[in-house]
Image (cartoon, rainbow, N blue to C red):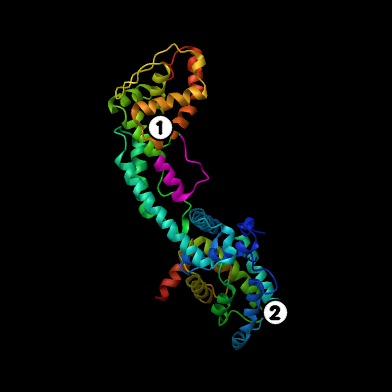
Amino acid sequence: MNQLYALGAEYGEAVQAKLWSLLKRQAMDYTLGDSGSLPQEVAEELFRSLLYTLQLYSNLAGEPLQALAQADESLWFDRALACLEGEIDRCKARYVQALRCVPELPHRALGDTLKNIGIGLQRYPYRHFAHQVPGEIDYQLCLPVPEERLGVSWLLEYLDRLITESLFLRAFDPRACQRLLSGRFPDYAELLINLYEPVLARALGRVLAGQPLEAPLLLRAEGPLPPSRFAKPTLRAAARELCEALGFPEERRAYVEQSALELLPRFQVAAENGTLNHLL
Amino acid sequence: MNLPGHAGPLSPANRAALALCADNELWNRYGLHLTEQAAAALVRREQETLAETGRIEFGQGALRKLLYAFCDSPYVDQSNVTDTLDELLQTFYYYKNESDGYLSDDELIEGMARFFNGPAQGSLEYLAETSLSELIRALRRKE
């Protein structure tokens, strides 16, 4: 028995039958009626796209997918597509916002990624492959978007996180950021590195070392440091202090705190050596 | 292979077999007749071929279209119709994978019939060994 036929079984037989009826519609739409059959891998992709579109609508409209069993599946899917188009519009607006706050730092991967997202959003094949992320993403975030998110939902979250990182970087003098990055990674502009994390680490280091944060001039944090200072609550408090000092938007502070906590092992090693100099 | 929610006595497979037999009046004009058993066996064979070639069928299948296209061939008669259709099914789905959506079902079947009745002179082996580009050329020659 082909494994494809088991897809959607978890929603019960009635919903699964509706899903397959929609998949047939999608398959015919995809081939423009020219072909009655499709390679299994293409059929699977169409199914993933269909399920993603329906689940997106289900989540946003508050209608459980099980309700499909009693509904006209074509109407449901048309509403889901309209909902997806709304999300694409939201994503385009967020993309423009991301472009507006891009950090003034040369970086090939970031530049290429932003360009690719623009092209990807224009060419996003959401009717058949909505679960695919529009555009090729080279630039890695400090905190990656969970892989469970798909398609335009993934991209919305990626852009939101990217905006947070960009706003943080823009709180500092770009020349100071460039010096810091070049010091750690010669030719950093060509490398697939995250720009935000080294700057965050340096700024947090200064807060933890009890030194004034002299934004926009970013200086190296100096040790020695008492190991007792490095625990999750301390780092979280330091991140809050840092955000406060920078006047960072309230709604974006959680991301800074979370990424600060990811630095904990590095700060602990630094504390054991009595200085932050070699790590930040 | 039945789609979920469509199993049972009137599954697509059974319906396809019945539909083939329903057209016997047409096949009879060309001296062909399909028994229910032969039709059911061909439908099963199509499902096996789909599985072997890694394809999923969403439409009515290719059998009926193949029979329509080949029933008037001078190389198909009652003695070889089921074996011929069996071979044609395999060739059809092989070419479907090869053509990667470039040819529609109707175009491909037309090209196969044109080649089978022309250069292949009824040889299924010759047809099966023909390259896709030759088939496409055969289609273009018609235009």
| SS type, badge 2 | helix
Give the camera-side residue of A256 and A198.
A256
Give the camera-side residue of B21 and B126.
B21
**Quadrant of the rendered structure where residue B16 is?**
bottom right
Question: Circle 2 is placed at which residue position?
Answer: B36
User: Does the magenta segment cover residue A145?
Assistant: yes
User: Does the magenta segment cover residue B5?
Assistant: no
Give the camera-side residue of A174 and A7.
A174
Q: Amino acid at mark 1?
A: Asn
Residue A138 in sight from this viewpoint: no
Q: Chain of mark 1?
A: A
Residue A56 in sight from this viewpoint: yes
Q: Amino acid at mark 2?
A: Glu
Q: Quadrant of the C terminus of chain B?
A: bottom left
Q: Of the residues tagged 1 and 2, which is closer to the observer?
A: 1
| SS type, badge 1 | loop
Question: Circle 1 is placed at which residue position?
Answer: A194
Image location (x, y in percent) of residue A267: 48, 20
Same chain under badges 1 and 2? The reply is no
Q: Is residue A247 above or below residue B87?
A: above
Q: Residues within 10 Å of mark 1 (few under 14, many from 20)?
A: some
Q: Chain of mark 2?
A: B
Q: In the image, A258: left or right of A12? A: left
Q: Which residues are magenta?
A: A143-160
* Numbered label attached to residue A114: none
**Quadrant of the rendered structure where residue A208 is?**
top left
Image location (x, y in percent) of residue B47: 64, 66
Q: Who's the residue at 36% across and 35% down the image?
A: A249
Q: Quadrant of the N terminus of chain B?
A: bottom right
Q: Who's the residue at 53% across and 72% down the image?
A: B120
